[in-house]
Image (spheres, helix red, strand yellow):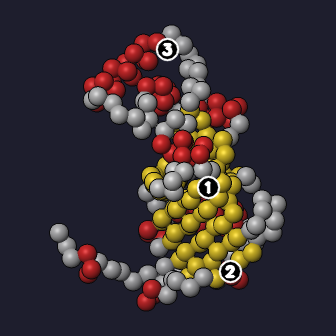
Amino acid sequence: MSDLADLRRQYAQAKLSRDHVADDPIEQFRDWFDEALDADVHEPNAMTLATAAPDAAPSARIVLLKGLDDRGFHFYTNYESRKGTEIDQNPHVALVFWWGPLERQVRIEGEATRLPDEESTEYFHSRPRGSQLGAWASPQSRVVDSREALKDHLDAVTDEYADDERIPRPSHWGGYVVQPTEIEFWQGRPNRLHDRLRYRRSAPDAEWTIDRLAP
């Protein structure tokens, strides 16, 4: 294994200044996301979702951003998974995007709430049929006896809905929207003097303030 202490690189691709960012962080995120798409970043919509249990024990995992509007950042999951149950108990979450080829990171803090049922249903039916069946078959985050047992469950669900053109959305599966209270844009710079601009607001209808943070 390589010496971890010697793993380092210089960041020098771009700069980030107040004069060249949007006043609204959602607009700024869209600009950066489009640049990540243009740069062919692998899975640019992959984001780390951090949640916390009532005892404050944190957990984190990668999920996919599947929508963005004035309300915030959308993702979908099993409501009964670990992240779902933790969000129900403590809606305060954090998201992190890392776009390595662009030397950029976006960090988001906010509150997660469930999307309306009709939006979750519409997205569910836009997914491939196999993914829809998987949502029924997987008791996400729970202990299973084996891979074979999981496959058997999928086979049973597949048989159950074999004659159904439209698979119903499980009541335990749907979307969340993370309404941000803070969004930080990070641009790698030489000598670890990275650029960090933080947007923050005190309430959903409040104005955003922008501050530069020390790296």
Answer yes or no: is residue 107 visible.
yes
Give the camera-side residue of 67 and 197. 197
> Mark 3: which amino acid?
Tyr
Q: Position of residue 211 (x, y in %)?
A: 68, 80
Mark nearer the viewer, 3 or 1: 1
Q: Earlier in the sequence, mark 3 or mark 2?
A: 3
Q: Is residue 76 above or below residue 92?
A: above
Give the residue furthest to the top. Answer: 163
Q: Earlier in the sequence, mark 2 or mark 1?
A: 1
**Marks 3 and 1: CB-CB under 8 Å?**
no
Q: Is residue 49 above or below residue 148?
A: below
**Marks 2 and 1: CB-CB under 8 Å?**
no
Q: What residue do we see at 43% from left, 17% from top? A: 158
Give the camera-side residue of 24 and 211. 211
Task: Calculate the distance from the C-alpha at mark 2 to the C-alpha at mark 1.
Answer: 22 Å
Q: What residue do we see at 53% from left, 77% from top? A: 187
Q: What residue do we see at 55% from left, 36% from top? A: 79
The quadrant the N terminus occupies is bottom left
Q: Give the quarter of the image for residue 115.
A: top right
Q: Residues within 10 Å of mark 1 (few under 14, many from 20)?
A: some
Give SS at disc 1.
strand
Residue on which disc 2 sits: 211
Residue on which disc 1 sits: 92
**Marks 3 and 2: CB-CB under 8 Å?**
no
Answer yes or no: is residue 50 visible.
no
Residue on which disc 3 sits: 161
Q: Position of residue 117 (x, y in %)?
A: 68, 32
Q: Residues within 10 Å of mark 3 (few under 14, many from 20)?
A: few
Q: What residue do we see at 39% from left, 22% from top? A: 154
* Number of numbered callouts drawn: 3
